[in-house]
Structures are given as structure tokens and as C-alpha cells.
């Protein structure tokens, strides 16, 4: 007689990402390490960055002005993460 034993491991518990409304670092509690931290902010190219660059291209500047939006952090999405454990806590998107 053969006995089969099924072993299941618990899945990861995913806690919803926090909503951020700023490009600036904020004070929050990390969902992973449970520490009270000030978030680290990294800026990423988003939809508004590309739209602004396309708009400048349509204007027709031949001096590379269409690249300016890629240098302006306020036109980029802000990715907030924990400085202790590097967990991504949430992203502030300029356009949702």
C-alpha cells in the first residue's frame, strides 16, 4: 500500500502598495521590515515625460529641446522604496 502525502507551503502575503502623492520623500512604516523610515525616491520616465517630449518634437525645435523633459524630475514618476530593505513601497505617478 502506497501513501501519498501532499505538502503545501504557504504563499506570500502581498500587502497592497501604499499611495503616495508627492515627489518628495515621506515618512512611513515599511510593510516588509516594519521600520519607521523616510522613503528613498527614485525618478523614472513615465507617460507625462514621453508626452512632453513628443509635444516639443511637434513644435519642431532642432536643438534637442525635446530631450528636456527627461532631465526634469517633476515630469517623471517617483518610485518610493525603503532605505533599509529596498522594498518598493509605492509609486507616485504624475498621470494615472
Image (cartoon, rainbow, N blue to C red):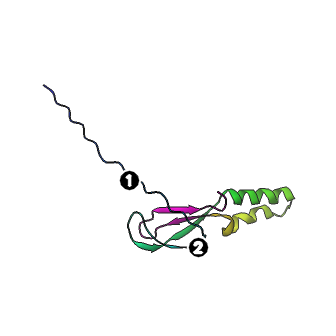
Question: Split into 4 quadrants, where in the image is the N terminus?
Answer: top left
Residue indicated by mark 1: 13
Q: Quadrant of residue 52?
A: bottom right
The residue most toward the top is 1
Q: Quadrant of residue 41?
A: bottom right
Q: Position of residue 85 (x, y in %)?
A: 41, 66
Q: Residue at x 53, y 73 (%)?
A: 26
Q: Position of residue 34 (x, y in %)?
A: 38, 68
Span colored in magenta: 78-96
Horizontal side, residue 66 vs residue 29: left or right = right
How far apart marks 2 and 1 lie (CA) works out to: 28 Å
Q: Position of residue 68 (x, y in %)?
A: 75, 66
Please give the count of numbered marks on the rendered protein: 2
Q: Residues within 10 Å of mark 1 (few under 14, many from 20)?
A: few
Decide: marks 2, 1 in contact (CB < 8 A)?
Answer: no
Q: Residue at x 38, y 66 (%)?
A: 33
User: Any mark on residue 96, and which?
Assistant: none
**Of label 2 and label 1, which has the lower sequence position?**
1
| Membership of 93 in magenta stretch | yes
Residue indicated by mark 2: 24
Amino acid at each position: 500500500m502506497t501513501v501519498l502525502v501532499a505538502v503545501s507551503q504557504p504563499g506570500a502575503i502581498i500587502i497592497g502598495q501604499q499611495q503616495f502623492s508627492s515627489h518628495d520623500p515621506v515618512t512611513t512604516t515599511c510593510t516588509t521590515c516594519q521600520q519607521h523610515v523616510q522613503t528613498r525616491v527614485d525618478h523614472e520616465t513615465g507617460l507625462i515625460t514621453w508626452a512632453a517630449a513628443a509635444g516639443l518634437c511637434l513644435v519642431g525645435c532642432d536643438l534637442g529641446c525635446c530631450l528636456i523633459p527627461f532631465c526634469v524630475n517633476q515630469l517623471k514618476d517617483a518610485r518610493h522604496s525603503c532605505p533599509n530593505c529596498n522594498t518598493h513601497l509605492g509609486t507616485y505617478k504624475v498621470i494615472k
